[in-house]
Image (cartoon, rainbow, N blue to C red):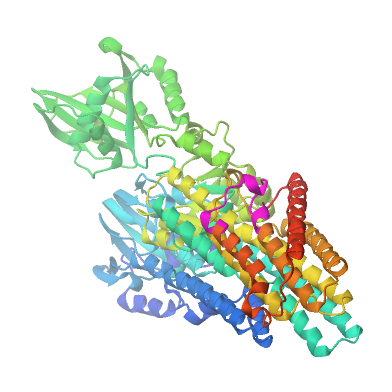
Amino acid sequence: MTDESAMAFWSPPADELLQHLNSSSNGLSTVAAEQKRIEMRGKDLKRQPTSPWSILAAQFKSPIILLLFGSAVLSYVLQDHTNATIILVILVASTLLSFFQEWSAANAVEKLLAVIQTEATVLRGGQPCQVPVNAVVPGDVILLSAGNVIPGDGRLLESRDLYVNEAALTGESFPAEKSLADLDPHCPLSHRINSVFLGTHVISGKGTALIVETGAGTEFGKVSARLQQRPPESGFERGLRDFGNLLITVTFCIVVVVFSVKIATHQPLVDALLFSLALAVGMTPQLLPAITSVVMATGAKTMAREKVIVKQLIAIENFGSMTVLCSDKTGTLTEGEVRLHAAHDANGEPSDSVLRLAYFNSVFQAGFNNPIDRAIRDHQTFDTAGFECVDEIPYDFARKRLSVLVSENGQRLMITKGMFEQILACCTSVALPDQVVEHLAPHVESLRRHFLDLSNQGYRVLGLASRSMAVERIAKSDERDMTFVGFLIFADPPKTGIAETLRQLRGLGISLKIITGDNRVVAAAVGRQVGIDHPDVLTGSELRTLNDDALRHRVNHVDLFAEIEPNQKEQIILALKRTGQVVGFMGDGINDASALHAADVGISVASAVDVAREAAQVVLLEHDLSVLIRGVREGRKTFANTLKYVFVAISGNFGYMFSLAVASLFLPFEPLLPGQILLINLLADIPAMALATDSVDPELIDRPRRWDVSTVTRFMLTFGLTSSTFDFLTFGAVLYLFHADETLFHTLWFIESLLTGLLILLIVRTQRPFFRSQTSVWLALATGGAAIVAVSLPYLPLHQELGFTPPTWTMILTVFAISGLYALGMETAKGFFYRGPRTAR
């Protein structure tokens, strides 16, 4: 078949499909099937094996990883083997951690295929036989009965009371009723009642189907193909990449300028090269991978206590940055099971007599155990002593009704329930309160009005009718001249407290997009029930008419996506990401796997199918959005502590290196020795590691936070240049007040650089005045300890080896005074910075 016809096999007459596939109602011959099997090789649902080497190599694509690797090499060149070893250990640990996470999740497609490894019953030459699912080919005619897993996408040839569970593919909690019909080529997946699909299974009834698509060509196969693709770059990964590129650019510019000027001023080539390389090492945030890993690992443990399991650590950052959450309604916003909400009489009032008749209809019917009858039986029990079922007319698609003939003391009553219009069509009278029975016609409009009112509230409404009969058997022709008794109202009710949960989500700056396969009326009603007062609804058929640009302009304004097909979920998520949103997707079915794969953070639940759990990055142990909210808060704490280090490193390092670069152009000696530069980096990084344990101000978790390189750049220039101002003040004091020689200059600026580096850590870790923000105990101890070491080193026995000389206490107090002014200046700069545009803070 052509691709176009294959996609719309539910549309043309079945005879045309049989002819096109060179098949018949008796199926293929064994020889023809084997020939087609040969032709279909390569189109099976087989996963291309993922090489562990390719996953390992992918870990080194980050600019920051490359920059740090270069920094380690330069440290070896500078004879700083200790620093080089530290950097390499950090790189190896962080890359191996990411490698093992990705490798452990690489079996998502095998999990997908495992759910369908079974056998099917096919007709070969008119004779039924069992064949493995992967031996079924287009043109095969399969036999369907209760419990069968369907081995391919196909068109029904026969259907007798056939119900198929398609929840994993469409998300619809009710079993799909199947019948024979020619449908519109653009009919959405959930409405293709004449078709069956790979991976779904038969609940009841019988039928035969012509297989049209197998393997990769099925709806199931499309999910498999999308899972094999590399997931789109997440918001955190994109921000980290942009940040790395910024660092490389700034470092390159500083090094080139300094090296060029030194060569132009006839300084020794080797000295100029070594100093420039030391500047490059000093600009790199050497502990960023370690800080990120430690912070995220700490966050993952805390989130586990909140019943949120993080499979990929990087998802924590995306969790905190999430601005949009996409979710199905069933099981997330609603309880996920059908319940009988009420039974109304013809006047729309609650009625026990209607409920009693519905109970008899459900308890005596001998068909399959469906959610509707189970909901009626579970709602309320009635005594059936003295009653017996004489006969039954099972439900079918033409009538859309189910009738039972019940006997009590020789009196027989036929009770019929079904679709409202189908019940109305077989009635000529209506039962009113006080056992009054009137002609139906005057009441039709009011009955229909009540039905529409209930439907618009999101309920599924059935009709109930009865007729007294003195017969032994009933037939379909007996469903006439009946009395309309009342309405049976079913609901999948919203979860308790869900409206408050969604209010909390909005308070965290996260908007909810409901994506469901249900019709727009039901979806809109559920939206209103959970607090979306005037939902903007977009249906799957409407979505198909929009190109990428049109969808991108529309997608942020839509609250509810209704009648959506599985592949459209991924389309919606990608459109949201193109608008700059950080998108979370919550799903638990096979049909959700590709969307989970495409989202910035895929969220599933412990009760989900294996494929969904494997495709997700985060698994909730409870199917509850309140659990997710706790996880979001923890994710934001983790992201805030990561950004603290970034801001500390980028502002402190830039200012420090800028000061070094400028001073080196005017001083008759190097402002610091290469080894002293690296020693400052090492001592400053020790308290920076304690940021992983730091407390987070409440205002830093009340809204989504994300990478924004423009803000990072402004931060770097604002705080870096302010820092350099005080460095130059130190230069002046050291040179003109104390007439320092080279060694004393190195000593005093070493102390000032390390003290101001520790102060900048305490200042930029919060938007508040630093003394009003509580630090963690470990951060306070590490910062105090590093400050003591900074002041003590020049007085220790090894000070000569480090290139230091003991300063006087007047000099030390002067450095302390400059550091105090530095803290005041930085606090002032911070106040001005945070009064400006706010993006990535």
Question: Which of these two is toward me, 463 or 731?
Answer: 731
Q: Is residue 57 above or below residue 507?
A: below
Q: How many marks?
A: 0
49 lies left or right of 783: left
Question: Which of these two is toward me, 831 or 820?
Answer: 820
Q: Is residue 79 above or below residue 736?
A: below
Residue 295 location, x and y as percent?
A: 52, 61
Residue 667 location, x and y as percent?
A: 87, 76
* Residue 192 shows in the view: no
* Residue 451 shows in the view: yes
155 lies left or right of 319: left
Question: Which of these two is toward me, 30 or 800?
Answer: 800
771 lies left or right of 604: right
Name the outermost residue toward the right: 265
Q: Quadrant of residue 110?
A: bottom left
Q: Quadrant of residue 491?
A: top left
Residue at horizontal 37 percent and vertical 16 percent from the top: 347
Residue at horizontal 31 percent and vertical 63 percent from the top: 142
Q: Is residue 229 on the magenta stretch?
A: no
Residue at horizontal 45 percent and vertical 44 percent from the top: 625
Q: Is residue 771 on the magenta stretch?
A: yes
Residue 84 location, x and y as percent?
A: 61, 81
Give the magenta-colored segment's residue range: 761-780
Question: Which of these two is toward me, 155 or 804?
Answer: 804
Residue at horizontal 32 percent and vertical 54 percent from the top: 158
311 lies left or right of 599: left
Residue 213 location, x and y as percent?
A: 43, 66
